[in-house]
Amino acid sequence: MKKIFLAYCFIVIAAQIASAQQLVFTHQPEDKVVCENSEVLYIVNTDTSGYGGAVMEYNWQYNNGSWNDVMGPEYQLLGDTLIINEVALSMNEYQFRCIIDVDGDVYTSESASLLVNVIPVVDFTYKGHCFGTNTFYKY
């Protein structure tokens, strides 16, 4: 009876270890500080060696008070990379994260912040001579 019980325990433990596959994030999204209208990238990298050739589905989300799926023409979703083409000032203090689904197992990356600075306004006056007369330029 003891041998049967030990064999059963070994099989149960081995089955639990085999089903405890974990996706390991080797690179998490990083906080970014950019000027408005610029481009920004968020990237995740993972070690999927425990999953063999499993298909991974990436879903990027942003948080501006609650988590929402990223969508719209200003975004490029390239699997493990999120590109924001023209960062709007209204995106200041957004957070971004990636959710990865591997054969029904769901993993969530850490979140990263986005700080957006206003494009500075440059104002200068040029005072010079052009063909013998004073010329003024103001931008």
Image (cartoon, rainbow, N blue to C red):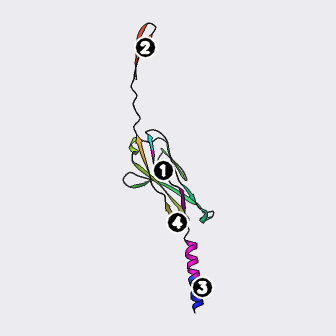
CA gap between label 4 and label 2 equals 69 Å
- Residue that carries the numbered disc 2 in the rendered image: 128
Q: Which image quarter holds the N terminus?
A: bottom right
Give the residue at x 55% y 75%: 16
- Whichever of labels 1 and 3 marks the residue nearer the N terminus, that label is 3
Please provide percent x and percent y for residue 43.
53, 51
Q: Label 4 neighbourhood size at 10 Å, few (<14), some (14-19), many (20+)?
A: few
- Residue that carries the numbered disc 3 in the rendered image: 7
Residues at marks 3 and 4 touching, judged by CB atoms closer than 8 Å: no
- Whichever of labels 1 and 4 marks the residue nearer the N terminus, that label is 1
Please provide percent x and percent y for residue 31.
45, 49
* Up-down relation of residue 111 to residue 134 (above or below): below
- Residue that carries the numbered disc 4 in the rendered image: 105
Question: Quick one: SS at disc 2?
Answer: strand
- Whichever of labels 3 and 2 marks the residue nearer the N terminus, that label is 3
Residue 30 is tagged as 1
Front-lying residue, 67 or 111:
111
Q: Is residue 136 magenta?
A: no
Q: In which quarter of the image is residue 51?
A: bottom right
CA gap between label 1 and label 2 equals 48 Å
Boundaries of the magenta span: 10-32
* Up-down relation of residue 118 to residue 68 (above or below): above
Give the residue at x 38% y 51%: 64
Q: Is residue 9 left or right of residue 118?
A: right
